[in-house]
Image (tube, grey):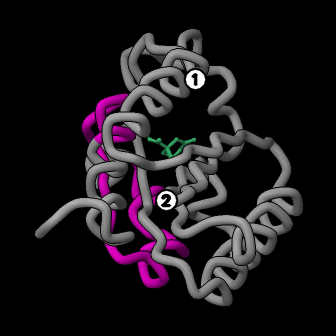
Amino acid sequence: PDILILNGPNLNMLGVREPQIYGSTTLAQIQQRCEAEGELLGLEVDFRQTNFEGEMVSIIQQARDAHDGIIINAGAYTHTSVAVHDALALTDLPVIELHLSNTFKREPFRHHSYISDVAVGVICGFGAHGYLLAMQAMAQLVGVLDD
Ligand code: DQA
């Protein structure tokens, strides 16, 4: 199985971006860990980042044919984007919503997500380790791990 791990705006700045909230691990380091975890789990990992909402929509549309599941950290578009919601709703793929921080412990504008209702589940608050937790959950959804 082949999974898409899609990162939205400002996640390219991890490491220097508010490390007290997001940790000091860079996105490149997270990508390396995800690729290593993919080898252990038997998952091909396509790790992407974009700062553009429309590009996120296009990447999600293309995942339909190329991937078996989507792990998405949509960054701030989580709280604003009907377009990302709609793109996820039209894929037949399992979706896992992911956040480094516990968005429910933060400002009220981060408490609503346009993604949660089109996701199988949500992982938030575990920092960079959440990516590995999400991959384990996805491995189960795509059938490479037993229940
Ligand atoms: C985030 C949480 C969002 O509220 C924020 O806009 C981000 C990162 C997280 O991973 O904790 O950009 O998705």
Magenta-colored span? 107-132
Q: Are marks 1 and 2 in contact (CB under 8 Å)?
A: no
Please, which residue is most extreme toward the left here? 147
Taking depth in this image into account, of 37 and 133 the one nearest to the observer is 37
Q: Is residue 145 left or right of residue 47?
A: left
Mark 2 crowd level (few <14, some 14–19, many ≥20, 10 Å Cα) = few
Q: Position of residue 14 (x, y in %)?
A: 57, 20
The residue pinned by badge 2 equals 109
Residue at position x 53%, y 50% from top?
73
Say what amino acid the circle numbered 2 marks: Phe
The residue pinned by badge 1 equals 27
SS of the residue at dot 1? helix
Q: Is residue 81 above or below residue 52?
A: below
Mark 1 crowd level (few <14, some 14–19, many ≥20, 10 Å Cα) = some
Say what amino acid the circle numbered 1 marks: Leu
Q: Is residue 49 above or below residue 80?
A: above
SS of the residue at dot 2? helix
Look at discs 1 and 2 and give the one toward the viewer.
Answer: 1
Q: Position of residue 29 (x, y in %)?
A: 51, 16
Q: Is residue 121 left or right of residue 9?
A: left
